[in-house]
Amino acid sequence: MITTPLTRWFDLQAPVFGAPMAGVGGGELARAVSLGGGLGMIGVGSATEPEWLAAQARVPAESDVSFGVGLMAWVLADRPELLDAAIAAEPALVSVSFGDPAPFVGPLHDAGIAVATAVNNRADVEQAQEAGVDVIVAQGTEAGGHTGRRATLPLLQEVLTLTDRPVLAAGGIATGAGLAAVLVAGAAGAWIGTPLLSCTEAMNTPAARARIRAAGGDSTVLTRAFDVAQGLAWPQRWPGRALVNEFTDTWHGREDELRGDAAAAALVAEARRSGDVEHAPLYAGESVGLVTAEVSATEVVRRLAAEAEVTLRGVTRLLSG
Ligand SMILES: Cc1cc2nc3c(=O)[nH]c(=O)nc-3n(C[C@H](O)[C@H](O)[C@H](O)COP(=O)(O)O)c2cc1C
């Protein structure tokens, strides 16, 4: 078994955190990741209702496994009730990413809940440390969903020089060898989203899962097109990495024309409602080409950890050769 400061802290069998994914990761996915020995997270989006979170949190809780909740700082500024709902759900970990986590760390710590935040550059690390977060997630641009512009490996190495806190690597980790690589680099584990996008427990549609399995690693784009079209208040510095489709082919790079375009807004809203994969956002990272089967998240986590162990044994053999 691989142990790190974070497997010890959260009593995990695998150094794998299931990233919070709004719209994809609810209680079933979190439970499945935790049953695999990792820590599963429930993703809370900008339109999530507190009652939904309460209901989802009961799923892992009823199976007696720990779980986490992922919040977004820019959303909490207007919707503090989501922080209250997260605290009431009694998770082991709450992440507050995409904005300054400082205002939220105190209430979470007062409730005995550990706090993580994603960082995308050096300034974010300083902000995270000042805020007093417990776990830092170095999120590279390879990641699916909203992310920064620095690549995972150089970002991870730099973050590790800046902090003594445990650091998780996020963005592009989808094999045991990839997990082993970030552990050898000094991460305390991996924070994976894309490898869970075709899991049986995910809330995305069968059509979306099929599209994910068919997609190659070259077919993602880092774009603001969906956020602009939907009029979402996502801060500009975090575009989202999504699969290319008809919508991004038409609008990526032409975001200024999209602003206030009612027809485009209606198109994306309808595509999300009907499951039209050509016009809805299908957020996914560069490791998507490695996601080729529909399996349980429990299996994904177990396999990652087992294969990382094999790789790490191979690494030690390199030294004796
Ligand atoms: C579909 C999708 C939705 C996401 N939603 C969130 C979210 O709600 N909150 C969050 O902090 N991160 C979110 N992320 C980013 C993940 O937390 C994580 O950083 C990323 O998935 C890790 O990289 P990977 O996708 O290459 O595994 C999302 C990612 C994806 C793919």
Image (cartoon, grey):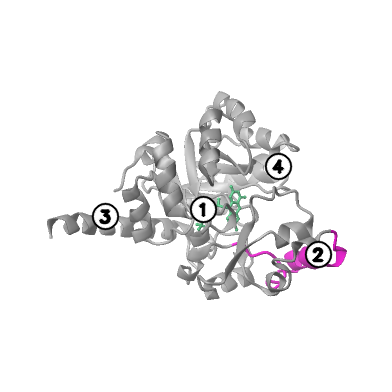
Residue 12: x and y, percent?
A: 39, 43
Q: Which quadrant would the C terminus be assigned to in this image?
A: bottom left
Q: Tell me which label, 2 or 3, sits earlier in the chain.
A: 2
Judging depth in this view, the residue of 59 and 306 nearest the camera is 306
Give the foreground label among 1 and 3. 1
Real-space CA distance between mark 4 and mark 1, rounded to the nearest whole angstrom: 23 Å
Distance from the alpha carbon under mark 2 to that under mark 1: 27 Å
Please state which of residues 64 and 222 is positioned toward the viewer in this rendering.
222
Is 261 part of what is drawn in magenta? yes
**Mark 2 or mark 1: which comes first in sequence?**
1
Q: As rendered, which of 150 and 16 lies closer to the eye?
A: 150
Number of the label disc, if any, that sits on residue 312: 3
Residue, disc 2: 257
Write down the residue under mark 1.
Answer: 150
Q: Are marks 2 and 3 in contact (CB under 8 Å)?
A: no
Q: Quadrant of residue 239?
A: bottom right
Residue found farthest to the top: 110
Q: Is residue 212 above or below residue 44?
A: below
**Amino acid under label 4?**
Val
What residue lies at 46% left-to-right and 53% top-to-bottom?
152
232 with respect to 210 (left or right): right
Work out whether residue 61 can be spotted.
no
Provide the secondary structure element on which disc 1 rests. Answer: loop
Q: Is mark 4 within 8 Å of ligand 1?
A: no
- Secondary structure beneath label 2: helix
Q: Amino acid at mark 2?
A: Glu
First to last magenta residue range = 260-283
User: How many angstroms separate mark 3 from mark 4 (CA)?
Assistant: 40 Å
Query: Which element carries disc 3, helix, strand or loop?
Result: helix
Q: Nearer the viewer, mark 2 or mark 4?
A: 2
